[in-house]
Image: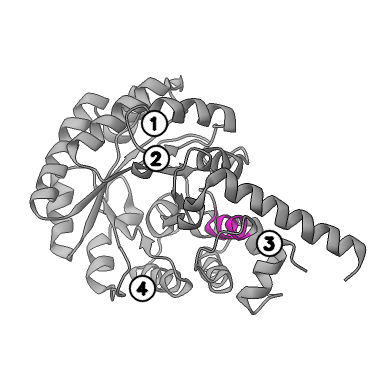
Amino acid sequence: MNKITRSTTTKSKLMRNLIQRRFGAKASQIRIYEVGPRDGLQNESKFVPTDIKIELINKLVAAGLKDIESASFVSPKWVKQMSDGVDVMKNLKRAPGVNYPVLMPNLKGYEIAKQCNIEEVAIFPAASEGFSQKNLNCSVEESLARFKLVVDQALTDGLRVRGYVSCIVGCPYDGPVDPKAVAKISEQLLTMGCYEVSLGDTIGVGTAGSVKKMLREVLTVAKPEQIALHFHDTYGQALSNLLAGLEFGIKTVDSSISGLGGCPYARGASGNLATEDLVYFLYGLGVNTNIDLVKLIEAGRYISNYLGKPTDSKVNRALGDRFKKQEDIVKIASCDL
């Protein structure tokens, strides 16, 4: 080993030790919540057949992911891509220990989803009035009343409920969003009975500074373990925003295979933080995600090839087919050459 390699390796180990001290022991418990099969695909113009969606989910399971949002039960008139939610969930062979949550906007969607042997549902109010009107065709207050009906019924039926909050720092219609509004909705969702609230930067305008400001407010009404982070990468800030969030002790991160994503009601929103990039990033911090990045890259290639477009994951593009073993990629991520 030459001097440069020794120096790089030493610096890498020092950085990982610093990260571990800064984040504490909980850094090793970071949970990845995959949203690609639902949030990732919902904005794609090319319809993805049921069997392709199921195979994508199976590949994500094979890579080691344990939480995979698999379908939504919204009106096919507005989101045609998700119109086969029943077929996806009824034909999907569930793997032991894997959570397959689904999303719905109202009680009607819940009643349809309930036919599919679901265990977890998700609801999605917005932090801004403008986005709530465009996305849900009602005010924020009205949306929360609708969602409460879903939560009450789901809890009665013994299901888990996750809440999303859209537009946590900026709205395509209303502009900057007050952190107090995000905190208020988060508190209401937790009071309803949501076990977790995922905070979504829907149009990806957040920075480490604006995210920290928002989180300081939210964490006055919630514990870090009740919060998840959901960043779109429109301005290339997703990973830096994530790092800012991890400093608060938050342990759950949403991501999408191949960086897929976007929203039909959010002008200019690009895809989500790519799961491949997230896993590589975490391995670089010394966090063992127990996810096989080789298989994850394969899953990203699979769906990107079907869609006929290049992957939006920088890690997927950079690593390509050069590595066949997970441990070799971890060495690259950690600079342990």
- Judged from the image, the secondary structure of the residue bearing numbered disc 1 is loop
Amino acid marked by disc 4: Asp
Amino acid marked by disc 1: Leu
The first of marks 4 and 1 along the sequence is 4
Amino acid marked by disc 2: Pro
Q: Residue furthest right?
A: 3
Residue in front for this viewpoint, 221 or 133: 221
Question: How far apart are the two marked residues, 2 and 1, measured between alpha carbons?
Answer: 7 Å
Name the main secondary structure of what is drawn in magenta: helix
The first of marks 2 and 4 along the sequence is 4
Residue in front for this viewpoint, 74 or 66: 66
Residue 264 can be seen in this image: yes
What residue range appears in magenta? Answer: 274-283
Query: Which circle marks residue 224 in the picture?
Result: 2
Question: How far apart are the two marked residues, 4 and 1, measured between alpha carbons?
Answer: 41 Å
Q: Report the mark closest to the observer, 4 or 1.
A: 1
The first of marks 2 and 3 along the sequence is 2
For the residues bearing labels 3 and 1, Cβ distance under 8 angstroms: no
Task: Point out residue 82 in the picture as x, y percentages from the top left corner.
Answer: 32, 55
Left or right, 73 with reference to 210: left
Question: How far apart are the two marked residues, 3 and 1, measured between alpha carbons?
Answer: 31 Å
For the residues bearing labels 2 and 1, Cβ distance under 8 angstroms: yes
Query: Which circle marks residue 51 in the picture?
Result: 4
Task: Point out residue 277 in the picture as x, y percentages from the top left corner.
Answer: 59, 56
The first of marks 2 and 1 along the sequence is 1
